[in-house]
Amino acid sequence: MTIMKKSLLTFFVALMACVLAKAGDLTTVFFTVEPPMSCENCENKIKKNIRFEKGVKEVEASAKNQIVTVKYDPEKINPDQLIKAFDKIGYKATVVPEGKVNKKAIKDSKSKKPSKCDEGTCHDHKE
Amino acid sequence: MASFCALNAQEPADSASVELGEVVVTQRRVAGSKSKATNSQLISSAELKRAACCNLGESFTTNPSVDVSYNDAATGARQIKLLGLAGTYVQMLTENVPNFRIAAAPYGLGYVAGPWMQSIQVSKGASSVKNGYESITGQINIEFKKPQSDQEYSANGYVDQMGKVEANADANWHLTDTWSTGLLAHWENAFSGHDANNDGFMDMPRVRQLALMDRWAYLGRNYVFQAVGRYIDEKRRSGQHSHTEHISDPYRIDIETHRWEAYTKNAYIFDHDNDGNIALILSGSGHNMDAQYGGKAYKADHQNLYASLMFERKWGEWHALSTGLSFNYDYLWERLRATHDKTDPLSKAKSIEAVSGAYAQYTLDLDKRLLLMAGVRYDYSSVYGSMFTPRFHGRWNPIEALSVHGSIGKGYRSPHPMAENNYLLASSREIIIDSDLHQEEAWNMGAGVSGFFNLCGRPLNLSAEYYYTDFKHQLLIDLETDPHTLYFKNLPGKSYSHTWQIEATYPIIKDLDVTAAWRRTDVKVDYGQGLVQKPLLPRDKWLVTASFAPMMGIWQFDATLTVNGSGRMPTPYRMDNGEMSWGERFKAFPQLSAQVTRNFRHFSIYLGGENLTGYRQPNPIIGAQDPYGPNFDSTLIYGPLHGALVYLGFRYNFTRYN
């Protein structure tokens, strides 16, 4: 292989490595929300809105465990901005440290009595 | 198996549920409720957005249990079929108030705009006695967008290849902590009539409709109040195409409808700890319809008043009782001319029926492991006398992954042949109505099992069920005995339906959900010459529906393929030219629909197609060349009437969270 081709190949591999490294460079953060999610409709409300925040790659919400999991690109967004995004849709979000996810989720889901969820929507506006 | 799973291996999710060592149960947009004794399915607005779903009649494309078909080739009247039986045996409710009865039944599915709906609940089998005695094969309850939900402004626009344009808009406001109000509007119009099969008739009717709904809600701690008013104005035009100007007296169908509905719900909660409450529902409706079928005419004025007083309370965690009184008043004024001679006078008929009733329903809920619901109703009709309606539902969930359910119950319906079936005037058949029609009466029973198990770390949902409906008395719409006559008569012998259905749902890969279902219906009726297979009904139905929503659902791809099996036509006859009027059976046919949606934060745009395989029932209108002649019949419909149809739409939504 000529030196030209070798250089191009090296450059290409390095570029791919950078791109792949960047693609894998996602951070995960866990939130609990107030008011708590009562049912699947509330999970969907959160997912449907948070997904449009720039830098968010994955959103999962679990009413059962009262945890919202967000995978994001730290170069485009940070947890504080995500908290503001929750605020825009009427939720007060709190970051849960990863080590505390198990216990806090279980404890919180048992202690908070979920408010009634209408058939087909999330909470009524009156709690 | 291991290598198959490896092919589909995903990276372990970071979600807490995996760390907790639990199985993530994917919840579908169509949720079968395992926490209710009845066999109910909730169709959410997310599921409705998988297809164009312009109105209720188009909201079941992806559902294997409910079929929607056209009654005839001319008027566009659509009917639901559940458990192989006509939609009239399904009780329609809007927010748990009986609706679309009698005169509103033929076109009722078109009176509910898709974007107005929050959810649809489909219950199969006899259903709860709370809403009356009229459900035989099931209940469909539509919940509209509520004023107390998140405040939003919404708009929707739709246009399709056939020249139909639709616009919807709705908004709601929270006026105070307790008062909220909402306004919903719908408008549609069709700008041209198509005739793709060149039989001289418009393939689909041109419908112009305006509908408005105004609603108010008061949600106090001890008192809850709701008031809703709705008005629908519709003009439906069909028949021989306007391009056929050389015809001196074109056969035209014109149907003009004005409908208003209003109801209030009042609930007083006297015991919060035990969900003790007393509720009063008052509802009224007025329906005025003026239909012309060539020279034949049918006019109907139906007024209804309904009141229901209910008392409910729980005892401990396990026991609940619901009991109540109801009163229903129907006033129907009909005028009919069954010939094309416009000088013939209209015959008149008036019917009044007042029904008072009482019910009691006991529910046992043993921690959702065992649910039993037993109800009895007694009603007295001023026309038909006493009705006794017992209903029983049971569900056993021995483990989280398995659920077994069963039900048995009775239902009744008062017969209104012309009001519910006047679209049958779009034929040359002579109409003969029995003078002494009995009230319809049937038993329904069914059982089923559903569950899930893990396949490669994802849940495979399976369900199987069987239903049997047996009529003791039935109003027969007899197209069978004589091809030139339509008889409305009492059932002389047996009439029953067996339905078997199996369904499987599985997320094949991440973001891709697939549902496959097979349903067999065996419906036999005795029209007077012994039991025959009910005509125009496919025996089998296969359905596969897939939904792919990558990138957190920002893009969505939906497709549904349905294959309707073959079935029987009514007995054919030999025409003057020696040919048989139609074949003895119709062949199986496929239907494919697909849609692509791109979602933005406040906006979404969708492009889709219906009946993409282009299958159209050949010769849906018999004798189309001579609609005033003796062979004209547009009511023998078993398949789609239009070919492939492409549509485009947008949805706008701005929610004000506070």
Image: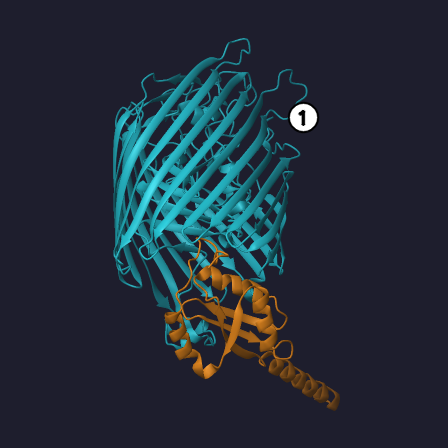
Q: Is residue B532 left or right of residue B260?
A: left
Task: Tell me the quarter of the image containing the N terminus of chain B.
Answer: bottom left
* Residue B424 located left or right of residue B240: left
The residue depicted at 55 percent of the width and 23 percent of the height is B624
Rendered position, B321 above or below B380: below
Which chain is home to disc 1?
B
Q: Position of residue B523 (x, y in %)?
A: 32, 36
Q: Which chain is cyan?
A: B
Give above or below for B406 relative to A123. Answer: above
Residue B224 seen: yes
Q: How far across and how far down the image is residue A4, in percent?
A: 75, 88
The reply to whether residue B486 is in sight is no
Residue B188 quadrant:
top right
Q: Which residue has dot 1 on it?
A: B243
Chain assigned orange: A
Foreground residue among B439 and B3: B439
The spot of residue B191 in percent (x, y) is: 66, 34
Three-letter amino acid code at the position of disc 1 = His
Q: Is B486 displayed left or right of A31 in the figure?
A: left
When asked about the image quadrant of residue B116, the answer is top right
Closer to the camera, B218 or B127? B218
Looking at the image, which is closer to me, B427 or A31?
A31
Color theme of the render: by chain
Secondary-structure class at tag 1: loop
| Total numbered labels | 1
A109 on left or right of B249: left
